[in-house]
Image (cartoon, coloured by chain):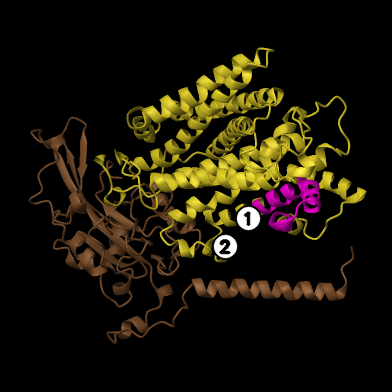
Amino acid sequence: MPISRRRFVKLGAHAAFGGLLVYTLRGIVLPQSTPRAADAEGNSAYDQYRPGDHDWAFVIDTMKCIGCGRCARACKQENNVPWEPQCNRTWVERYSFTGDGEVTVDSPAGGINGFADEPLPEEVRGKKITKSFFVPKLCNQCDNSPCVQVCPVGATYKTADGIVLINRDKCIGCRYCIQACPYGGRYLLPDEGVADKCTWCYHRITRGRLPACVEACPVGARKFGDLRDPESAVSKILAERNVSVLKPQMGTKPQAFYLELDGEVV
Amino acid sequence: MDGYVFPNEVEIQWSLLIVLYPFITGLVAGAFVVSSLYHVFNIKSLKPVASFSLLMALSFMLVAPLPLLAHLGRPERGILIFLTPNFTSAMSGFGYIWMFYLILLLTETWLVFRPDIIHYARTTGGFKGLVYRTLTLGMAEMSEEDHQFREKAIKVLAAVGIPAAALLHGYVGFLFGAIKANPWWSTPLMPVIFLLSAIVSGIALLIVMYVVVMKLLGRPVDHDCISSLGKWLLAFLVIDLVIEGLEILSMAYESEDSWEVVSELIVQRIPVSYFGIQLLLGSLIPMVILGALAAQARREGASPVIFAAALLVLVGVFAMRWNVVIGGQMISKSMRGFTSYTPPLGGREGVLAASVLLMLPFYIFSVIVSFVPPWERPAVDEGERSPEPGEAVPAWEGADSGARGGAWDWERR
């Protein structure tokens, strides 16, 4: 049946109306984006911050970490990370080698209370421990991040300065990103029903401050800086020392680098 | 919890509902394939279930997104998958693939049942008559041309539906197979495995539903049809088992570092549901049963045995979905430990909620067939346009069907 002009125009009008409806629906579901709020502290650093001018990197020195857990505590407080159910933006693992080829790893409560009073894991009790160290973990802000790739609605994204962030107003809570992260870095916020993870304290670093965990570390096991600045501590370490990343075979290109990383650490 | 599990992995993220999701979409894909075997490839023995399976596919299709939606942390934002999809995510395709397939299913179902709808619209009054008249979409007459077009269109849609069914369920397999972080999921074979087990489960449920519904109605079961379905089930089951076996075999033989944790998973964590239910009870035993039957010529007594084998297959495929979805999440990404999971009884993601969701398609099916019973089609069977020579006349008595106007109810015996 040939379509008359009148019918064609009518069809077009209907299609336009439908499109408008969908667009409006989208506006209802998604909260209106507000213009960047002026910095509450009147910090001019935030107003002048240009994401494109930075390339943030993290360096963790496993030989320096003493397992005090201050970083994990500072993080919980700084970022309002829930205490129950267990979830951590950053945590500390204890590795114990007993010389018989066995490796035992534990991280009670994510190492928040430190390991000083923490009894040894059952598996190594009574055995001679030949080697032991602590490994702080946090989001690797991967350059090729699986979490960004799998988010079905684009709620998680990578910023120009290399940080992976989550738009809490957009996340639908499908948890695909939690499944896709090879490092166990993500969790679901129990009350909000949305995914959450470490942001390297984006609200602080964009104001010229250090991430809370870096500031809290008493021994300098956590280093944070800008790879665009050749004089920064992280730039120098990457230029001069042997570093490795976690699970390099995943091809995720982590931006958190580890000094003196044992091959048993994953 | 056992060994070392990352602090964020204490709780399993994808629960029983996500086990249900691939199970349900699998049934859709399988039922549709059977319908297409008749409509496209003209497998005549499947005629008694050709339109039956279409309605079954539609019933399950309508429920397919519900477990996903119920599982979301923010269900009210689920629509964003349509509105702001991120196309690098396999999951973003869900809404579109589901919608495309639903439209295809609805169109084909409507075309297949169009003569019935028109017939009932003429002979039924009251509310039901109104429903039928609405369903005619204002086209209450069928000309000779319409009939020819209908037959062609059904064939085309049924043909398009096969790759669409493969897409719908292969895609679900891809959702899991593309997660490199999980050694139990990450394999390019996953879409193929999901697709084959989907077809297997769809045929199995069709056998079960067809027999149960015929018994409930006191109608004779078409044993040729059951026998044919049994053979198709056997064929797909064999291919399915070979591919699944191939996957495990190559994992074990290559024994990369992840094999250590995968083998511990299947041998120590899920041995009952994997070896016991998925492989032995749900695959090998039905395969032997169906194989033995296929080798025999006798048909009359075979149907109850095929029915039993189909039931076993259904349990096996459900176990397979469980072993993939839950089993995969039990492995800690630290590769040093395992999480455990027992579904709660109540709550949004509990056993009760899952049971309701699993029963819902059957309810929808019963409502749909109360309008267009696929086993009693006066408009099609009596005025069959071109009855194929030598075709078996349906064994049931359809004498009063016209007068009853399709007002079929469960009490009728």
Residue, far right: B144
Q: Which chain: yellow? A: B
1 or 2: tag closer to the N-terminus = 2
| Residues at discs 1 and 2 both on one chain | yes
Position of residue B113 measured from the top left corner of the image (x, y, whole percent): 76, 46
Q: Amino acid at mark 2?
A: Phe
Q: Which residue is mark 2?
A: B82
Q: Quadrant of the C terminus of chain A?
A: top left
Chain at numbered mark 1: B
Q: Which chain: brown? A: A
Q: Is residue A186 magenta?
A: no
Position of residue B222 measured from the top left corner of the image (x, y, whole percent): 70, 26
Q: CA distance from mark 1 to mark 2?
A: 10 Å
Q: Is residue B109 magenta?
A: yes
Q: Are marks 1 and 2 in contact (CB under 8 Å)?
A: yes
A243 vs B365, nearest the viewer: B365
Give the label, 1 or 2, closer to the camera. 1
Q: Amino acid at mark 1?
A: Met
B164 vs B366, nearest the viewer: B366
Main SS, magenta residues: helix
The region drawn magenta spans B102-130
